[in-house]
Image (cartoon, rainbow, N blue to C red):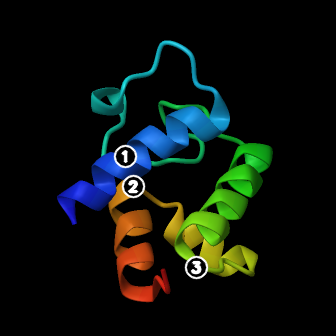
């Protein structure tokens, strides 16, 4: 699971083009949306597309998205439990 978290941190940074953000800057328990990274709904949409493409995991409604993007830990757990690739 730690490897998945590290991989996700790198993918979040590259997918969103976050300048001046390093993987260790992302708090695994902190809020992804509205947290220190300042992610908004457009960023979440980009991440949803990346997660579907890279992991075969669908996040297809807002209620699920709120839970999944609550933190990096929640995102990693959801991908771990639902990945097809």
Mark 2 touching mark 1, by CB under 8 A? yes
Residue designated by label 1: 30
- Residue shown at 22% from the left, 66% from the top: 1
Q: Is residue 41 left or right of residue 76?
A: right
Q: Dot 3: within a 10 Å radius of its alpha carbon, few (fewer than 14), some, or many (20 or more) residues?
A: many
Mark earlier in primary sequence (1, 3): 1
Distance Cα–Cα, label 3 vs label 2: 15 Å
User: Which residue carries the number 3 mark?
Assistant: 57
Q: Is residue 42 above or below residue 82?
A: above
15 vs 40, left or right, is left
Q: For residue 72, which numbered disc appears in the image? A: 2
C-alpha span from label 2 to label 1: 7 Å
Disc 3 is placed on an element classified as: loop
Q: Residue 59 at what x, y percent from top left? A: 66, 77
Spot occupied by residue 36 in the image (x, y as percentages of width and height): 47, 30
Location of residue 68 with respect to 24 vertically, above or below? below
């Amino acid at each position: 699971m730690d490897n998945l978290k590290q991989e996700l941190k790198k993918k979040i940074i590259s997918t969103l083009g976050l300048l001046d953000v390093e993987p260790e800057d992302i708090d695994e328990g902190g809020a992804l949306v509205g947290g220190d990274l300042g992610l908004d709904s457009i960023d979440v949409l980009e991440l949803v597309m990346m997660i579907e493409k890279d992991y075969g995991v669908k996040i297809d409604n807002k209620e699920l998205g709120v839970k999944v993007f609550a933190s990096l830990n929640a995102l990693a757990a959801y991908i771990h439990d639902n990945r097809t690739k």
